[in-house]
Image (spheres, rainbow, N blue to C red):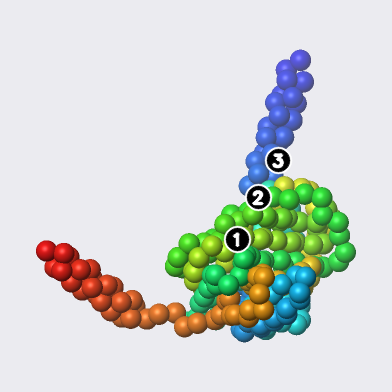
Amino acid sequence: MLSNQLKKQSLILAGSVMACASIGSAATVNLPDIQIDSLGHQYFYDMWMGSNAIDGVAIPSGLGTYTTTPFFGHAENGDTISQRVVAPSGSQFSVTRDPAFNSQMFMFSIYWIANSDATSTSAMPTVTFENLVGSAPVISYTFTGVGDVGHVIHAQLQATVSSDFSFTGLAMTYPVNNSPTAGDQTFTIGSSSSVSFGVIGNGDGDVDATLMSLTAVPEPTSLGLLGAIGMIALRRQRLQKR
């Protein structure tokens, strides 16, 4: 009897150790950064569709240019995927909300692909506009996750632009909530959209405009000077009211 009890306790202990090991094995899978080196611009007007302006990058080739490297690894249930799109050092993405367009959408659609794979699950991502100045666009759609087998890691985002803003990078993190079975493999970047990263504007008239551009990050001294000028202007207004 004592022997059987010891065996049961040993089995329970072994099961607990295995469960702890499984929980502790969850990792953050950091995909290679995608640096946007240049943004391309497209415009067309159609009497039925109106005007359409696009500023961005089409991956793997087409509009704009980018730099990244392949990724070797895999993702398991419980892992966290982390991926970033960044501007070159010293630069930022500057988005302009042009009133000539009825709507402007910020788009992100990037896949890392090792082989064909179906995707049946999506996880809620955490989205961060790094070094954001202004109001971030309002997210209306996301679709992120890992393929059923593990051959594809994907992230899609769509957001409404309501005002001007700037940022130096976009970071997305999301959990792996399915159980892909594939082991380590080499992933290369791809996209399922004509605009992988950028802004699309749509309007009624024949109007063209630049909606997103790469600009230099303002120097701290310049920001301080702008702040001082603003304070002086505010003080003058108060004196005039008196």
Residue 126 seen by the camera: yes
Mark 1, residue position: 160
Spot occupied by residue 145 in the image (x, y as percentages of width and height): 73, 55
Decide if residue 240 is on the left or right side of residue 21: left
| Camera-nearest residue between 32 and 40 | 40
Q: Mark 3 or mark 1, which is nearer the start of the sequence?
A: 3
Q: Which dot, 1 or 3, sits closer to the camera?
A: 1
In the rendered image, which residue does mark 2 sit on? 124
Q: Name the residue carrying label 3.
A: 18
Q: Please tell me in which quadrant of the rendered image residue 204 appears.
A: bottom right
Which secondary structure, mark 2? loop
Residue 82 in view in this figure: no
Where residue 35 sits, quadrant-wise, is bottom right
Q: Is residue 121 left or right of residue 214?
A: right
Q: Which residue is painted at 55% across and 72% down in the image?
A: 98
Looking at the image, do the residues carrying marks 1 and 2 touch, with CB atoms under 8 Å apart? Answer: no
Which of these two is toward me, 58 or 160? 160
